[in-house]
Image (tube, rainbow, N blue to C red):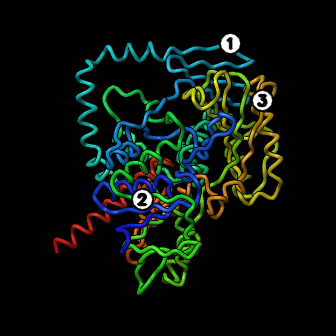
Amino acid sequence: MDYDAIIIGSGLGGCAAGAALAGAGRKVLILERMDVVGGRCSTKVREGFRMDIGCHFLFGCEHGAFEEACRRVGKGGILKFDHPDSFCIKIKDVSIVVDGKDLIVESPKSQRITVHLAEGFQEMMKMMPQELMNMGFGMMGQMMPMVAAMAAPIVEQFDNVPIGDFVDQYLNWPALRDFVELGQFAGFGTPSFLTPVSEMIRTMLIMMEYYKPGMNPLEFIGYPIGGLGTIPATMCEGIKDNGGEVRLEANVKRIIVEGGRATGVELDDGEVMKAPLVVSNAGIKETVAGLVGNEHFDAEYAERIGKLIPGITCFCIRAALDRKITDLDGIFCIPDGNLVSYYHTQWEQHHIPDGRPAVMWSVPSNMDPTAAPEGKQLVIAVGPLTFESDEPYGKIEQDALNTMEHVLPGFKEHLMWYEFLTPDSYMVFGEQGAPAIGIAQCIGQVGKERPSSKSPVEGLYYVGAECGVDMSGIGTDMATRCGLKCADYILSQEKASVGA
């Protein structure tokens, strides 16, 4: 055998699995079809503006799975993150700004209202000694794995309860209900009438496990200094330091299965490489039906995987501005009307609603000045858009640009150029439906209903933000944890077989 493990795809799941295996002494080969590592977490540069392919706010950051994966290959502490300190939520004509110190509400029909969050928090902190708080949080962090295990049977009861139905029992304030809808959609990539309450609970348990004494809650989200691509690049450097290889522009044509076992891969150019383990980060549906072939699985399993629902995809506008026009790190715009109805229209009717779209902005150059040339600004806008839309994508492109001008006056005046990416643009990754967050975290596809990382074909595994029984969380962090968990399972099985 040429390698101990071949990993298809250098997305965060693949890189994390590779890091865990390489760090344990296994000879790893990562094959990436693109000319840069990272998949949906990669970075390219245009005219001095750094363009990230995927999301621009990450969960977990230096406290979560990214750091753990890097640590496995001796790269711990290298990744640095900036954490947002100023958000604006735009609900119709009402603006809510949180800047780390104050919460400011502005509306044309009312006076400006300011709530001094920092002062209130400081007063609250005076009531409890810091040493006692640190001890409490420290104990909580150590107990979280046990708490999560004990809570699992209770959490499972909510696998079939939509977040929307649950929230509607207690919340009858339309504006706040829209805010809840936007927040959960940003995390899970599915509307609240499909996302189960259990995913929210599991994610909160992960946050508690990551929490360190003295942390600001905003430290759970952030942007990596150097761009998204620094995360997989750091992992890959560690893999190479530990004797592994990373090959770019190496497109896998098929996974070789012999006698019911994966034994290697064949590239487009006919080159064959052998390994007793093949780990695919190419998407579970694409792996089963495409790289392996349904004929190597029993009909029921192949049918089940084929019917998995992908998460909603998106449009993306990357805008280069000739000057800085905002100090905000993030902006959330909720469209006129009801946001739940907006998602129903897109998800079920495949229709692009009229008027202002739901858009989430990030301003990477405010968090990392190297993301744009000096004196200029990079603004990224992302919004939901179904792959099966029955209307031209140009409709939402113009609506989104008009919304950006509405939220950021002067946007069009200072716009140098922009790129508009549609679901078709993401097909370069070869994913069916070009999902923004892998397989949807929806009812019927979470908890124990989530596909296992271990395939029925011996020696074949899947990783990424779409597999792993009981695997949950948010996007990139979930994909990374899946890779680590899969690799740890493989290593434990090796150890068990040696012991036997």
Q: Which residue is tagged 3?
A: 415
Image spot of residue 406 (x, y percent):
77, 28
How busy is the neighbourhood of tag 3: few (under 14 within 10 Å), some, or many (20 plus)? some
Residue drawn at (53%, 17%) of the image: 102
Report helix, strand or loop for mark 3: strand
Work out whether residue 319 can be spotted.
yes
Quadrant that contains the N terminus: bottom left
Q: Nearer the viewer, mark 1 or mark 2?
A: 2
Disc 3 + disc 1, Cβ < 8 Å: no
Disc 1 + disc 2, Cβ < 8 Å: no
Instruction: Return the residue nearer the eye: 241 or 374.
Output: 241
**Amino acid at the residue labelled 1:** Gln
Q: Which residue is tagged 1?
A: 111
Q: Nearer the viewer, mark 3 or mark 2?
A: 2
Answer with mark 1 or mark 2, whichever residue precedes in sequence: 1
Quadrant that contains the C terminus: bottom left
Can you name the residue that lies furthest to the left here? Answer: 499
Disc tally is 3
Can you name the residue that lies furthest to the bottom here? Answer: 259
Q: Which image quarter: residue 279? A: bottom left
Q: CA distance from mark 3 to mark 2?
A: 42 Å
